[in-house]
Amino acid sequence: MSEFKKKERALLMTICRDEKVPFALGEQLLKTAEISTYEINTASSRVKKYSDLITFHYNKKNG
C-alpha cells in the first residue's frame, strides 16, 4: 500500500471516529462519491444513491 493511501485511510478513520460514523460507511461513501464524479448523474440521483447507502448501513447496524 502506498504512503498516500495509508495517510488517506488514517485520515478517513479519524474523521469517521470523530463523527461517530462506521468506517465501512465512510469508505463506501467515499467510493460512491468518486464513482459519481466520473459518471453523468443528476443531483437528485446522487442524493438518492447516498440516501440508499446510508439507510442500508443504518439498518444493517441497527437491524
Image: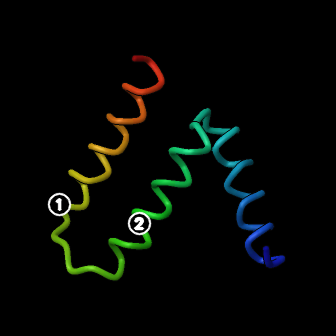
Image coordinates of residue 43 in percent, x first then y, are 20, 65
| Quadrant of the image occupied by residue 9 | bottom right
Element under label 2? helix
Q: How many marks?
A: 2
Q: Residues within 10 Å of mark 2 (few under 14, many from 20)?
A: some
Q: Which mark is residue 16?
A: none
- Between the residue at mark 1 and the residue at mark 2, the CA separation in whole angstroms equals 12 Å
Image coordinates of residue 1 in percent, x first then y, are 79, 73
Image coordinates of residue 6 in percent, x first then y, are 79, 67
- Position of residue 53 relative to residue 33, above or below, is above
- Residue placed furthest toward the front: 1
- Residue placed furthest toward the top: 63
Q: Is residue 40 left or right of residue 58?
A: left
Amino acid beneath label 2: Ala
- Position of residue 40 relative to residue 18, above or below, is below
Q: Which mark is residue 45?
A: 1
Amino acid beneath label 1: Ser
Element under label 1? helix
Picture residue at 73% right of the left edge, 72% below the top: 5
- Residue placed furthest toward the right: 3
Q: Is residue 50 left or right of residue 7?
A: left
Picture residue at 62% right of the left edge, 44% below the top: 23
Q: Residues within 10 Å of mark 1 (few under 14, many from 20)?
A: few
- Position of residue 21 relative to residue 43, above or below, is above
Q: Earlier in the sequence, mark 1 or mark 2?
A: 2
Contact (Cβ within 8 Å) of mark 1 with mark 2: no
Q: Which residue is mark 2?
A: 33
What sort of colour scheme is used for the picture?
rainbow
Picture residue at 37% right of the left edge, 25% below the top: 59
Image coordinates of residue 3 in percent, x first then y, are 84, 76
Which quarter shows the C terminus?
top left
